[in-house]
Image (cartoon, grey):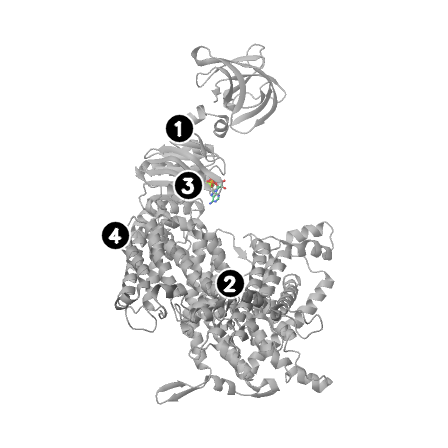
Amino acid sequence: MTSVRLDWAAAFAAAIALFPLPWYAGRAEALLPLLPDRPWLWPGLACLVAAAATALAAPRAGRGLVALAAAALVLLLLQGIAIGLPTTTWPIAEALFGAGVRQPAFGPGAAAALAAATMLIALGFARARAFNADATVALIAVAGGVSLALFVFLPILRVLVDVFVEAGRFSLAVAFDRLAAPEAWGLACLAGGVRCGVVWNTLLLAALTGVLSTLLGLAFALLETRGGLAHTGVFRALAVLPLITPPFVVSLALIVLFGRTGIVTALLWELFDIPRTRWIYGLPGVLLAQLLSQTPIAFLLLSAALRAIAPSLEESAATMGARPARVFATVTLPLLRPALANAALLGFVESLGDFGNPLVLGGEFDVLATRIFFAIAGARHEPGRAAALAILLLGLTLGAFWLQERWVGRRQYVTVAGKGDAGIPAPLPAGLRRLVSALAWPWAAFTAIVYAIILFGAFVHDIGRFDLTFTWRHFIEGFAIERSAFGLHFRGAAWDSLFTTLEVAAISAPITAFVGILLAWLFARTSFRGKGTLEFVTLLTFAIPGTVVGVAYVTAFNVPPLEITGTGLILILCFVFRNMPVGVRGGLAALAQIDRSLDEASATMGADAATTLRRVVLPLLRPAIVAALAYAFVQAMTAVSAVIFLVSARHNMATVYIVGRVEAGEISLAIAYSSVLIVLMLLVILIIDRVVGAARLGRRAAAPLVRVGA
Amino acid sequence: MIRFETVSKLFGATRAVDRVSFTLAEGTLTTLLGPSGCGKTTTLRLIAGLELPTEGRIEIEGRDVTALPAAERRVAMVFQSYALFPHMSVRENVAYGLIVGGMAKRAALARAEEMLDTLGLAGLGDRQPSALSGGQQQRVAVARALVLRPRVLLFDEPLSNLDARLRRRVREDIRDLQRRLGLTVVYVTHDQAEALAVSDIVVVMREGRIAQMGSPRELYDAPADPFVADFMGEANVIEAEVAAGPDGVARLVIGNHALEAPLTRQAAGRMRLAVRPEAIRLTPPDGTAGLPGTVRRAVFVGGHMEYEVDTPAGLLFATAPSSEPAVAAGTLVSLAFSRAIPLG
Ligand SMILES: Nc1ncnc2c1ncn2[C@@H]1O[C@H](COP(=O)(O)OP(=O)(O)O)[C@@H](O)[C@H]1O
Ligand SMILES: [Mg+2]
């Protein structure tokens, strides 16, 4: 069965690590000839060989195998971390193996050895009857844990360490200075000074975005569910757009409208002599952009929550003589409270993490995310300062995330009974109805204009200067294709980044979805010690802001043992680990709807976990897989915060390229490229839905369970 | 044969199954009976391998399976929800275990078809499970279990999702099948009538432990304690001073009344007795023997009459065939016991 296959797989991986594969990155030599002068490799490799031999020769050894394989993993990792470049090698390693000892980063051979050790640990656990004695379960859990440690926690830990390090020396005082710096916490603006600390800026912006987007979303949701309108589909259509729009594209449209030479600005100047200013660059502009993106999400959340309120509750209040305004205030609103808190916190967290909009529209108004970026990418490269700011941002985000889980997360499961609660939701009190209409309709119109500009701006000469002559110029500049003697020549400036983006998205999305769904299954359907922790930690990674991930990756993976900065691999890894938690959440929600006895029935009929997974669970999870695939793909195409640290000349991404065009003032090209991205994403989502999503499921007994919040 | 040796299963601090030991013989049908939450399902899942015991030892056919996962036990289970795979046809559902076990797909589907025939489901193989009635779905679940020729077949409340009319039929079908194939079956229910009707052995459970185990007759006639007495059909529990008499007929003193009643076993001294409703006879008061009482309530329920009688021993519940003349509420009567069960 599986466990038999796993021991051979592990032995094979160990064998190719030792013999044919080059151990180091960028070298051709296999390991064996190098071994005599590299004594630090001996202990780890010895453990690995012993573990592989144990796995093959002693099928009963469980705990012992775990110990050997874990020792191999830890020793191999440790020697890699301890001995790197001259600047990064630990003193203890120099003391042991001589001054000047160094080695390059891990290569394919080392990767195979680590994989072999991981498999052997899992196999050992399964043989020791842990993880339900199932090797597949053990492998998913162990591999999940090891890769989370390597690609999430070690990098974050690295950032944390960097806070304490100044010129190669460890210092508490330095860390304190950095974390408490006036740059972050200063209150000069209150005392008449120019600027306040960047932490306050960030918090102010996030709080405004959270509260205002929730209010606007509530207005839309009330109008949709209780406003007595026939055609509210337009809200839903508008609500999808921000999900497939690169985060800063809205900012572009705002510049086109309200910039110094913007359409509205020009009109105001000509008609009313209102002087041209740069008000859009700063808090108002960033806030506006974030509201445009966040309001639809708040709307979706709140409208689901409003639907889940049984009309009979409101009706019973009404039959007791309560007037509509009173019903709303005493029944509807209190029931909605958890959803409101959730929406506000979500807006808060999204705003904290947003990088694109403040970058494009922030002007003098800095937030943590942009400040971190400039500390790394600016003229003065200050990794210590960036690390401290990143830790502050991480702290804020985790705090908000913790609040959300603690305070509202537990109450976010709403079961919708299959039968449905007859009755009509209470109509809105007249005054409230006028108020929400006055809020919602202008905002909807504004949103529509913003997206119209993005579409329209791509096809006119210079929308920023109101030159509306039709042209293909921007598309030709970005996407020209010529036929040359050597075949097609993609001459347009945008092709390189577009190809990279598509490639990275196409590789990372399936991995993300697959890993996410596997982990969801692990969390929902198996039990083992430490599962709760692993699950919590997995979902927590979702809360880490992209900027922090970017800093962490660029510092941690710039030096041996894992030296992948500047490669396409780092982009793929970054997306996989950033987006996987969403797949996990989606999978968990979907699994909650699938009766557990289906898995169990499969088991009693002799299927091991891998077979059950393949034949029963995955087919039933198709909708969740499609959702995770689409999400991962869209994220890989639209994200900017983490990747802006990780792109290189060879591997540039579309969003980063667009940001570059904006900074160079080529707004029209940026807009044209953005609209191409949006159309491409729609296409890909449709294709994914067609190919993977053609699932015909019989009716299921369980009542559908709706998870509010992504 | 299934053997439990002091098996416990803890969920956190809850002892769902608490030091349970029993041996179930080959080829018998055993029911696990008890109120909701007493650990029946958990016991069944321990046999199936869907839960592994916290402590203790489980043997199936002489083999220690304590740590063996479900997939390797060859124990089949029919789930309460039937657990038919919604993305497979009925035939594919039945063939699933065979295919997973390595049989060629065509052969497996052919075997599945035969099994469907055997269970009277011929012609339904191409349907989706959701297109079948509840009774048919259950038979598919049984077919899916039997096609693997399991050593042990488990049922968790198999009648709970069926309408009342079907229940008796399905119950008899399961019993016939078990006898015909000589299967070892363990059957969970909370309905004592169902348990009495189908079982060779009944295991009454209470709060994770075995309250009593035996044949339906034994449990009905000689319950070990008031809980079992009450659970196995209704029982009136009476405090009495018992003095053994000749021929197993004892003299009972209740308060300052004395009467004679046959006991199910020898006993003497002050004790609690269980008296079944049908073992109480209402006669006109004649002033000599018997327990005096007043009929509080008389209800005609079709096959028999139900009476509540106020007596010095408390409010007693009695039944009488409706072929006998009914006694009106308010009538003074004298009660005689045709049988009494000493408890504890
Ligand atoms: N997976 C579980 N996690 C926690 N408690 C459980 C679990 N399964 C059962 N229990 C508890 O164990 C006890 C026995 O449950 P169960 O065997 O399902 O009872 P029954 O089938 O007799 O109604 C109950 O108190 C139940 O709440
Ligand atoms: Mg049960």
The percent coordinates of residue A654 (x first, y second) are 48, 77
The percent coordinates of residue B112 (x first, y second) are 32, 50
Q: Can residue B125 be seen in this view?
A: no
Mark 2 vs 4: CB contact within 8 A: no
The percent coordinates of residue B285 (x first, y second) are 58, 13
Q: Could you tell whether A42 is left or right of B302 in the image?
A: left
Q: Name the residue under label 2.
A: A542
Residue furthest bottom as drawn: A485
Q: Name the residue under label 4.
A: A57
The answer to which quarter of the image holds residue B296 is: top right
Q: Mark 3 points at which residue?
A: B54
Instruction: Please report, as a chain letter, where disc 4 is located.
Output: A
Q: What element carries label 1?
A: loop
Instruction: Please report, as a chain letter, where disc 2 is located.
Output: A
Residues packed near mark 2 inside 10 Å, few (<14), some (14 to 19) or many (20 plus): some
Q: What element carries label 2?
A: helix
Disc ID at residue B215: 1
The answer to which quarter of the image holds residue A97 is: bottom left
Q: Is residue A81 visible?
A: yes
Using the numbered discs, state the Cα–Cα distance from disc 1 to disc 3 in whole angstroms. Answer: 29 Å
Using the numbered discs, state the Cα–Cα distance from disc 3 to disc 4 in whole angstroms. Answer: 30 Å
> What amino acid is at disc 1?
Ser
- Which of the two residues, B336 or B33, is positioned nearer the viewer here? B33
Using the numbered discs, state the Cα–Cα distance from disc 3 to disc 2 in whole angstroms. Answer: 35 Å
